[in-house]
């Protein structure tokens, strides 16, 4: 699933952050460096080095191919319905962004999920 998702070029990052020490900053920036179209999702909505950040997935100007989750499991759980409603099929969970309840719901919704790899590490390999 890793290779398939990395071939998709439009990503949304839930938990995008303007804090340079966080993966919510590092992953969107690395995606852009690697040529991806990337949008941030964060209710605070601050742009990150030219990457637009939106409060909700439904606010995005285009449908992403992949949603990368960099939030706690409670927020991941509440975001899954938005992902399904938007017609997005692929979700990449960063370490710490999921628990059993989140994974069960993602599978029930029929989403393709990646949870065994860090997107930041994998992006460094391409």
Image (spheres, rainbow, N blue to C red):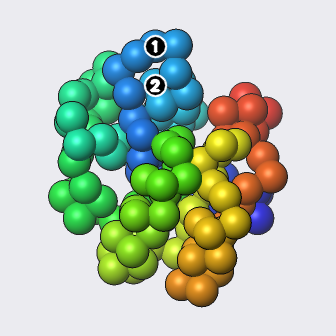
Q: Which mark identifies residue 20? A: 1
Q: Which mark identifies residue 122? A: none
The quadrant of the image that shows the N terminus is: bottom right
Looking at the image, which residue is at 80% across and 52% down?
116
Q: CA distance from mark 1 to mark 2?
A: 5 Å
**Label 2: which residue?**
25
The quadrant of the image that shows the C terminus is: top right
SS state under label 1: loop
Q: Picture coordinates of residue 71 (x, y %)?
A: 49, 43
**Sequence-earlier tag: 1 or 2:** 1
Crowding around mark 2 (Cα neighbors within 10 Å: few <14, some 14 to 19, many 20+) is many
Q: Picture coordinates of residue 16 (x, y %)?
A: 40, 35
Looking at the image, which residue is at 54% across and 84% down?
109
Q: Could you say which quadrant of the image residue 63 lies in?
A: bottom left
Looking at the image, which residue is at 70% across and 43% down?
95
Q: Picture coordinates of residue 38 (x, y %)?
A: 40, 43
Q: Is residue 90 left or right of residue 60?
A: right
Q: Could you say which quadrant of the image residue 115 lies in?
A: bottom right
């Amino acid at each position: 699933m890793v290779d398939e998702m990395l071939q998709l070029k439009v990503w949304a990052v839930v938990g995008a952050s303007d804090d340079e020490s966080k993966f919510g900053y590092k992953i969107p920036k690395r995606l852009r460096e690697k040529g991806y179209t990337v949008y941030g999702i964060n209710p605070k909505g601050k742009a990150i080095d030219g990457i637009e950040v939106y409060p909700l997935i439904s606010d995005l100007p285009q449908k992403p191919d992949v949603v990368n989750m960099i939030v706690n499991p409670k927020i991941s759980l509440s975001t899954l319905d938005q992902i399904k409603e938007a017609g997005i099929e692929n979700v990449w969970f960063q370490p710490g962004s999921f628990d059993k309840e989140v994974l069960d719901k993602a599978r029930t919704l029929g989403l393709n999920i990646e949870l065994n790899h860090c997107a930041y590490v994998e992006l460094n390999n391409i």
